[in-house]
Image (cartoon, helix red, strand yellow):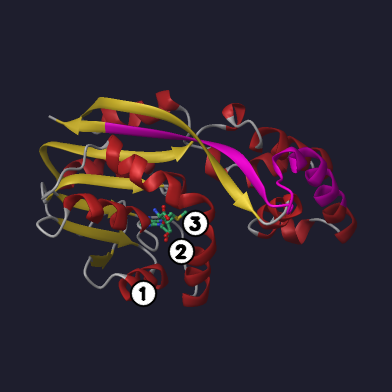
């Protein structure tokens, strides 16, 4: 199981209000489409957070279908349940899903794999809970080498703070290699239906906010001086200024990898 990943209700609401529209919402319909979700199907959204994928699945399966969102974090589920009491929400670990074998037609997981202690086990669990012929759909972010903006940005931070920054800022990019993903799906007995490499954007109010957000979200926040922080922000403004509009808002390109694979 993943180390405790507890956040408050207020943090979960901020996640839903700010981070979902700024980054996560764009991939949800793509993942649902990639996994060939159809009207009337039953769909599980693993590590659902506040349920952006569950909601996108519901729009396709309709009222004849069933949609369940599962997450470890009760605060995420509370926000999800308050917004959409018409869907099912369940507390559960992706590595030990509280569902029967073959209970769903499709199991999806968006931006979750890199948090799991054993992603292979989570994919095997998703394969277990889908019926034979059912699909498993995964979304994650491409590796840093394939990221047009985040690659140079992490290089910039490493120049100011040392090489360990790569590990600290590396979580999101740690399962982006398509071959690695396909090893996970085939180890779970799934055969590839489709893979997609999709370039999207992460939206921030300013280029400097990209640096602030990334630093605050990691232990780097406690390891660097205010002077270093200010230098990183200034360099980030230079690096990512090319993605700013007239108001200063930046749309930073970010590449995601999506995979759909079928259980035999
Ligand atoms: C970046 S959020 C993504 C949420 C959602 N899929 C989305 O696209 O907005 C990662 C989620 O994974 C959940 N999570 C982390 N480890 C988990 C685990 N072992 N089992 C279930 N959920 C987990 C967190 O609580 C969090 O809601």
Question: Pointer 2: what residue?
Answer: 4
**In this image, 109 relative to 57: left or right?**
right
Q: Does the residue at mark 2 contact the one at mark 1 (Cβ under 8 Å)?
A: no
Comparing marks 2 and 3, which lies closer to the viewer?
3
Question: Pointer 1: what residue?
Answer: 78
Q: Does the residue labelled 2 lie within 8 Å of ligand 1?
A: no
**In this image, 124 relative to 74: left or right?**
left
Which residue occupies 47% across, 65% down? 16
- Stretch of the chain drawn in magenta: 231-260
Which residue occupies 39% across, 60% down? 49
In the rendered image, the vertical position of residue 200 relative to residue 86, given as above or below: above
Q: Does the residue at mark 2 contact the one at mark 3 (Cβ under 8 Å)?
A: no
Q: Toward which corner of the image does residue 171 lie, by quadrant?
A: top right
Q: Can residue 106 be seen in this view?
A: yes
Alpha-carbon span between mark 3 and mark 1: 18 Å
Question: Pointer 3: what residue?
Answer: 21
Regarding ligand 1, which quadrant of the image does it lie in?
Answer: bottom left
Name which of mark 2 and mark 1 comes first in the sequence. 2
Percent position of residue 261, x then y: 25, 31
Closer to us: 250 or 23? 250
Name which of mark 3 and mark 1 comes first in the sequence. 3
Classify the position of the N terminus by image quarter.
bottom left
Name which of mark 2 and mark 3 comes first in the sequence. 2
Alpha-carbon span between mark 2 and mark 1: 17 Å
């Amino acid at each position: 199981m993943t180390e405790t990943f507890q956040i408050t209700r207020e943090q979960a609401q901020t996640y839903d209000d700010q981070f979902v529209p700024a980054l996560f919402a764009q991939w949800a319909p793509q993942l649902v489409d990639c996994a060939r979700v159809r009207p009337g199907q039953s769909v599980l959204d693993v590590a659902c957070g506040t349920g952006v994928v569950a909601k996108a699945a519901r729009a396709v399966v309709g009222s004849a279908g069933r949609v369940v969102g599962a997450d470890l974090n009760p605060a995420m589920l509370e926000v999800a349940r308050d917004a959409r009491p018409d869907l099912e929400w369940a507390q559960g670990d992706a590595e030990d899903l509280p569902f029967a074998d073959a209970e769903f037609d499709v199991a999806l997981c968006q931006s979750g794999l890199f948090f799991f202690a054993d992603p292979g086990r989570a994919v095997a669990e998703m394969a277990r809970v889908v019926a034979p012929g059912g699909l498993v759909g995964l979304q994650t972010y491409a590796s840093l080498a394939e990221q047009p903006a985040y690659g140079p940005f992490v290089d910039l931070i490493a120049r100011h703070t040392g090489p360990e920054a790569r590990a600290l800022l590396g979580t999101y990019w740690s399962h982006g290699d398509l071959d690695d993903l396909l090893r996970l799906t085939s180890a779970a007995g799934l055969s590839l239906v489709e893979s997609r490499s999709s370039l999207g954007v992460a939206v921030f109010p300013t280029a400097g906010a990209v640096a602030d957000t990334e630093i605050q979200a990691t232990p780097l926040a406690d390891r660097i001086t205010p002077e270093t922080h200010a230098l990183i922000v200034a360099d980030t403004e230079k690096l990512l200024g090319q993605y700013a509009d007239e108001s200063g808002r930046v749309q930073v390109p970010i590449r995601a990898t999506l995979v759909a694979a079928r259980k035999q």
